[in-house]
Image: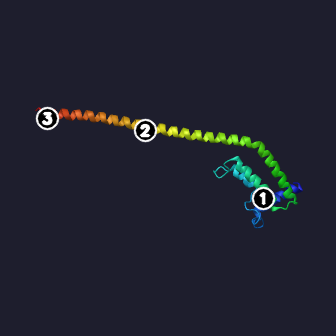
């Protein structure tokens, strides 16, 4: 590991292993291992979109710049890497926007399909209830006719 990347690595470890040094200066510590864990989370606690990943990656570098003096190698490296990240992000941003639009449209479509399925199920249930009621009415009509016949037979005897 080269000397400069070694120091960057040490800073990122120090953020978590020695929070009493970092906490007064860094309000929200962040490191790449946390970012990776959030990206790989399967329990719903992970990132919801790419913009959040970018924000946390950016935070790693801004924290390193905040913690270290401008003349410090780590500050300089963090500034350089932040510039690279932002340069790449600008190239990626239109694709991110397009993908987020596509996902929102897909989610809206899924919600609409669920509503249609619910309405179809409700309509079928209503039709089934209507059919049952019609059958009951039919049986009541038959029963009524039988009762009327029996009464007429009893009266005419």
Q: CA distance from mark 3 to mark 1?
A: 100 Å
Comes first in the chain, label 3 or label 1: 1
Query: What residue is pinned by disc 1?
Result: 63
- On the image, the x and y values in percent for residue 38 come to 70, 52
Q: Residue at x 54, y 40 (%)?
A: 114
**Helix, strand or loop under label 2:** helix
Indicate the secondary structure of the residue bearing disc 3. Answer: helix
Of labels 2 and 1, earlier in sequence is 1
Which quadrant is the N terminus positioned in? bottom right
Closer mark to the observer between disc 3 and disc 2: 2
Q: Is residue 43 above or below residue 143?
A: below
Relative depth, front residue between 142 and 55: 55
Q: Please identify the residue farthest to the left as the structure is shown.
A: 157
Instruction: Give the mark, 3 or 2, whose residue is nearer the N terminus.
Output: 2
Crowding at dot 1, Cα within 10 Å, few <14 / some 14-19 / many 20+, comes out as: many
Cβ–Cβ under 8 Å for marks 3 and 2 = no
Q: Position of residue 113 (x, y in %)?
A: 55, 38
As drawn, 67 above or below 136: below
Circle 3 sits on which residue?
A: 154
Instruction: Give the residue drawn at x 73%, y 40%.
Output: 95
- In the picture of the structure, the residue carrying the numbered disc 2 is 125
Q: What is the CA distance from the residue labelled 2 to the residue labelled 1?
A: 59 Å
Mark sitting on residue 1: none
Residue 45 higher or lower than 94, as above or below: below
Q: Nearer the viewer, mark 2 or mark 1?
A: 1
Query: x%, y% of residue 13?
Result: 79, 60
């Amino acid at each position: 590991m080269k000397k400069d990347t070694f120091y960057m690595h040490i800073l990122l470890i120090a953020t978590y292993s020695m929070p009493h040094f970092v906490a007064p200066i860094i309000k929200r510590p962040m490191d790449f291992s946390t970012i990776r864990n959030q990206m790989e989370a399967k329990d719903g606690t992970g990132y919801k979109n790419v913009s959040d990943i970018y924000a946390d990656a950016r935070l790693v570098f801004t924290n390193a710049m905040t913690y270290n003096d401008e003349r410090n190698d780590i500050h300089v490296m963090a500034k350089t890497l932040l510039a690279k990240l932002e340069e790449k992000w600008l190239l990626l941003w239109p694709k991110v926007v397009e993908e987020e639009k596509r996902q929102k449209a897909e989610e809206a479509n899924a919600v609409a399909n669920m509503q249609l399925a619910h309405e179809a199920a409700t309509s079928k249930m209503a039709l089934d209830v209507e059919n049952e009621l019609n059958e009951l009415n039919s049986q009541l009509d038959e029963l009524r006719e039988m009762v009327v016949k029996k009464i007429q037979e009893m009266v005419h005897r």
